[in-house]
Image (cartoon, rainbow, N blue to C red):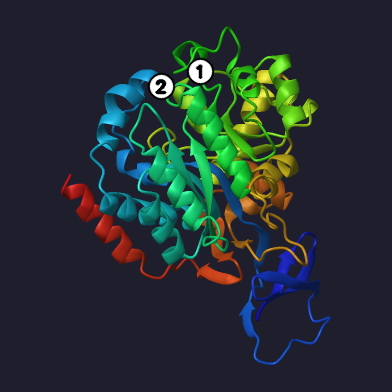
Amino acid sequence: MILLKSVLCGKEVSDVLIDGNLFKRIAPAGSFEVPGGTEILDAGGLAILPAFYNAHSHSAMVLFRGCADDLPLNRWLSEYIWPRERKLSPADVYAASRYAILEMIRSGTVFFADMYWHRAETIRAALEMGVRAAVGVTFSDGLSSDEEKNVLFLKEHALEYKGLVHLSVAAHSIYTVSAPLLVRAAALAEELNLPFQIHLSETAEEASKSLTPTNGKSPVAYLDSLNVLSPHTVAAHLLHVSDEDLCILKARGVTCVHNPCSNMKLANGTFQMRKMLANGIRVALGTDGAASNNNLDMREEMKFASLWAKAVSGDPELLPAEQVLEMATKNGAEAFSLNGGVIAEGKLADALLVSLDDSRLFPGDLVSNWVYAADSRAIDTVICDGKILMLHKKIPREEKIIEEFRRLLENK
């Protein structure tokens, strides 16, 4: 057990008891007897906040940070990213994923949904670093993937990975995956009760570039006509959607992952936050890859998501701090069927301890300042699954991970 002693939780200084991987008790400081043998962490001067759940990422793309900036998506992918990805080895993905996870921990993320290649190496990195992950097994006709090997891997390992790391079925997009493969991948996700990840409606030209003719349907309507949309579906981007599309997304229980920094940088379109919320669609947040963001900092995604929504709508009351914090935490957890994203008894013990001495966390409301004012320097300690990943800004093996990643870059 771990006791977080005298930590600010909401408006009250509390003692927070962690038993195993769950929050067992949260009560006013000094109000309950601490079980013998409990590890006590003095959290005076710190506040507890939910840790981030990054609902869409390509972690190993930290390798390509800054290598192809200020380009439109299609050119960025075809001329710069895909050619580089074809040369990646499993060792490259492992070293880059560890480095990316290090960056995520330091900026408060304890879960990431990944869609990339050499999935076994991403799994290995996540398990070694002690974070949660939904690692995608990526299907694509137009890119490098082996359909039968993917199916076999999922069927052999879906039950094996049910702890910190679990699998997901990742169909890259309608412009790299044919209709028969989309149907097969989605059916596999349903059969194995796994999340089904896909890039969807990211650009205005997406339908015209589809591998299979959409017969004039929007990307959302096209997928619906294939019967692949369901509550298992976690769709990234969804920038170009009609009112009919929104009705379909709501009816099918699809989660939308908004990636504000990446979307703005690539100038792919405008996210319709007001309509998404009005239609009752669950919106989570993601960073996308570090090649198009260019970092993995979920706190930045919160601020940009809120400000973008206000600017586009002309409504300063749209997407207040509490709501966008839920998108970055609770909604991401729910999208991947995780019992976390909030600080409450019986929930997964994933949390951040932030320093109340940080100059950007006062004066004023803590959550508001966390969303709009502070940055990751305010994070003192990171906890995932009841285990401390970063204590007082120190992460075990950090120097070695950085050194190995630098060595990898030098040899490229």
Q: Residue furthest top?
A: 216
Image quadrant containing the C terminus: top left
The residue under label 1 is: 203
Classify residue 301 by image quadrant: top right
Q: Residues within 10 Å of mark 2 (few under 14, many from 20)?
A: some
Q: Residues within 10 Å of mark 1 (few under 14, many from 20)?
A: some
Does residue 72 appear in the picture of this structure?
no
Image quadrant containing the N terminus: bottom right
Question: Up-down: is 395 above or below 102?
Answer: below
Number of numbered labels in the structure image: 2
**Residue drawn at (58%, 57%), measured in percent from left and top?**
358
**Residue 411 placement, left or right of 164:** left
Residue 276, horizontal then vertical, whole percent = 72, 26
**Residue 118 placement, left or right of 179:** left
The residue under label 2 is: 73
Residue 120, horizontal then vertical, whole percent = 38, 54
